[in-house]
Image (tube, rainbow, N blue to C red):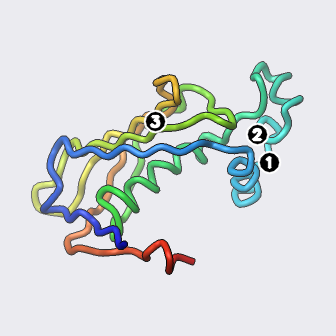
Amino acid sequence: MQIPSVTFDELNIGDQHKSARIITRADIAAFAAVSGDDNPIHLSDVFAQAAQFSGIIAHGMLVASAISKSLGTELPGYGTTFLGLNNLKFLKPVSPGDEITTTITVTKKHDSKPIVWFDCALTNQNGDPVISAEAVVKAPVVKAAGPTPQSAP
């Protein structure tokens, strides 16, 4: 099954998409390896507890990357180009096992260019806000479909 994009012309103010995922220790370790951010607050329970957390916490940018996933693969979807992330705020730490729900909402469309603004709100399983931001993207102007789950690398 292919997932088509939503074109600029099809997007409306108020359109919204939600997706959820559980943050795991493996996610955190992989992000540390890829990013080079090996701050022990993300990798050592002992260190994190000394820093007054209950255990390791996820990198803020790992959690914020859910915004890119939502915009690039869900709404608008394939063909979207990320232009900016404004007013990114880390509101509450995320721990392994937390389920994070990303909600993106169209708030503005450019009059003459395929530019769209989104409110981005990430909450944990208790409904507590963990990240807020405004994303700006160039939306696709033609339908694009991505790889099917069977053909994805």
Q: Position of residue 139 (x, y in %)?
A: 26, 63
The residue mark sitting in front, 1 or 2, is 2
Mark 1–mark 2 contact, CB under 8 Å?
yes
As helix, strand or loop, the secondary structure at mark 2 comes to loop
Q: What residue is pinned by disc 2?
A: 42
Nearer the observer, 45 or 19: 19
Say what amino acid the circle numbered 2 marks. His
Residue at 28 percent across and 42 percent down: it is 105
Report crowding for label 1: few under 14, some 14 to 19, many 20 or more residues within 10 A (C-alpha): some
User: Is label 1 in contact with label 3 (beta carbons under 8 Å)?
Assistant: no
**Amino acid beneath label 1:** Asp
Look at the image and tell me in which quarter the N terminus lies. Answer: bottom left
Specify the farthest residue to the right.
46
Residue pictured at 33% horizontal, 52% vertical: 136
Q: Quadrant of the C terminus?
A: bottom right
Quarter holding residue 55: top right
Mark 1 = which residue?
38
Q: Is residue 62 left or right of residue 127?
A: right
Q: CA distance from mark 1 to mark 3?
A: 24 Å
Q: On screen, 36 above or below 150? A: above
In the image, what residue occupies the spot 34% across and 68% down?
Answer: 3
Q: Earlier in the sequence, mark 2 or mark 3?
A: 2
Crowding at mark 3 (Cα within 10 Å: few <14, some 14-19, many 20+)? many
Q: Amino acid at mark 3?
A: Leu
Residue at left 72%, top 56%? Answer: 30
Q: Secondary structure at mark 1?
A: loop
On screen, residue 18 above or below 47: below
Residue 122 shows which numbered tag? 3
Left/right placement of residue 72 relative to residue 40 reads left
Measure how far apart labels 2 and 3 are at the Cα level.
Answer: 19 Å
Give the residue at the far bottom of this rendering: 151
